[in-house]
Image (cartoon, rainbow, N blue to C red):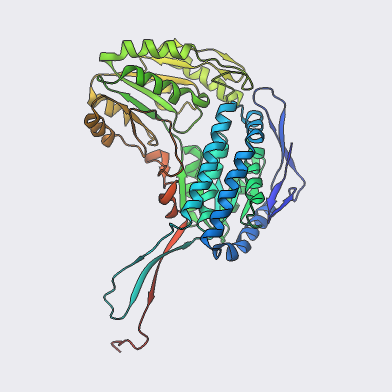
Amino acid sequence: MNISLLINGADRPASSGRTYDRIDPFTEKLASRAAAASLEDVAAAVDAASTAFGAWSKTGPGQRRAILMKAADIMDSKVAEFTRLMIEETGATAPWAGFNVMLAANILREAGAMTTQISGEIIPSDKPGTLAMGVRQAAGVCLAIAPWNAPVILATRAIAMPIACGNTVILKASEQCPGTHRLIATALAEAGLPAGVINILTNAPEDAPEIVNALIAHPAVRRVNFTGSTKVGKIIAETCGKYLKPALLELGGKAPLVILDDADIDGAVNAAIFGAFMHQGQICMSTERIIVDTAIADQFVAKLAARASQLPAGDPRGHVVLGSLISLDAARKMEELITDATAKGAKLVAGGKRSGTVVEATLLDHVTPDMRVYSEESFGPVKPIIRVSGEEEAIRVANDTEYGLSSAVFSRNIQRAMAVAARIESGICHINGPTLHDEAQMPFGGVKGSGYGRFGGKAAIAEFTDLRWITVEDSAQHYPF
């Protein structure tokens, strides 16, 4: 499949004529061939978005809403095409692809609903005869940088609210899934989104730093949002700081699932299985640390290990729960984490085997802070179980990380669970549910090394608009001189 750039509503090759190949991680066959954008293409995309901004920012909310709603229906109709691309480009399973399309379509609908919620306020003024207002206006050209792991959800999230707020967008597609990201723009174009409101750049992996720097540096780009690793997020943040560009960053995670001594054990096992192993653990909210009170640990671990051992892993085109990891390097990292932990005293209680890019659901019990898997984001199906004595130690271990995106607490005592949740340093916390959950209308984001800013619903309006102070005054007012 050949993937073109989308600039000012037109498909076009890279100005240099260069392309790059994305290889299916499981079959090692060609998945897609995409245009490798140059700095000339960057300039053309920003010019297109900048030109389109004038008319789009003045478009009424009803028209913006209608286009986004129609795009959601079109996206739903393309689920088979999205699924094929996600399987081939990222090694995902069909259920994960289907969920991506469903939630992404809902993100478009939620963004459409927000077009009439971009409200301001009247603010009392001390100056006689003055009407003072706080008014939100579209910011301008927004740069969106989205990852491969939940490609339809996260790329749609990166562009939907900016467009709803009257901005124009440049989506720098992930090098791992250019076809998947490009198809999102096709749905929007078919819905009637005017030329230049969304532009798609695909780039060769080695060109990413140069392309991103040029995009952020361009004077017409007014907002940046990035979802990806904390390592790259820090570079994005530094570059945005250099050019004084506001950034919304949703970065890595090491989500703790805290299971207190009065927890519903079967419920906690269900949440752990889903949160840890959905999409091979390659989700920013994936359960990355299973923290369990020693009073119930033996019973909990036995049930969890039995369930994990039954999860089928293999060809993502088959009837499996765990498909392919994104790359062979990612799969080999899982082996390194297992080897390091077992060498230092951890007990392998489920899984542990790798076949190519497929790794079994793996659990390591009795994990301690000196093991890599305790602190490193595995971003795969190798999960540590950390035993703690009491609530205070559980909270300390939950917060013993640079990250702070999602978390969860299991307890039959809701008041107790709420008190523990209040002390966990994370942007998201679920009580008696998995760390893995997302809805289009919820404020989504983290603290600490997981970034700052919020996607989702009304919270995102503030990220993609400028709040202006505007007054209507008495032209005959008195001045002191």
Q: Residue at x 44, y 61 (%)?
A: 466
The image quadrant of residue 403 is top left
Residue 380: give x, y in percent of width and height: 50, 24
- Whether residue 247 sits left or right of residue 411 in the image: it is right
Residue 191: give x, y in percent of width and height: 63, 51
Residue 296: give x, y in percent of width and height: 28, 14
Q: Quadrant of the C terminus?
A: bottom left
**469 vs 78: above or below:** below
Q: Residue at x 35, y 89 (%)?
A: 476
Residue 231: give x, y in percent of width and height: 49, 38
- Whether residue 142 sits left or right of residue 86 in the image: it is left
Viewer-closest of 271 and 445: 271
Q: Quadrant of the N terminus?
A: top right
Viewer-closest of 44 and 322: 322
**343 vs 469: above or below:** above
Mark yes or no: residue 389 visible: yes
Mark yes or no: residue 38 visible: no
Q: Residue at x 26, y 75 (%)?
A: 126
**62 vs 354: above or below:** below
Residue at the extreme right of the image, as rendered? 17
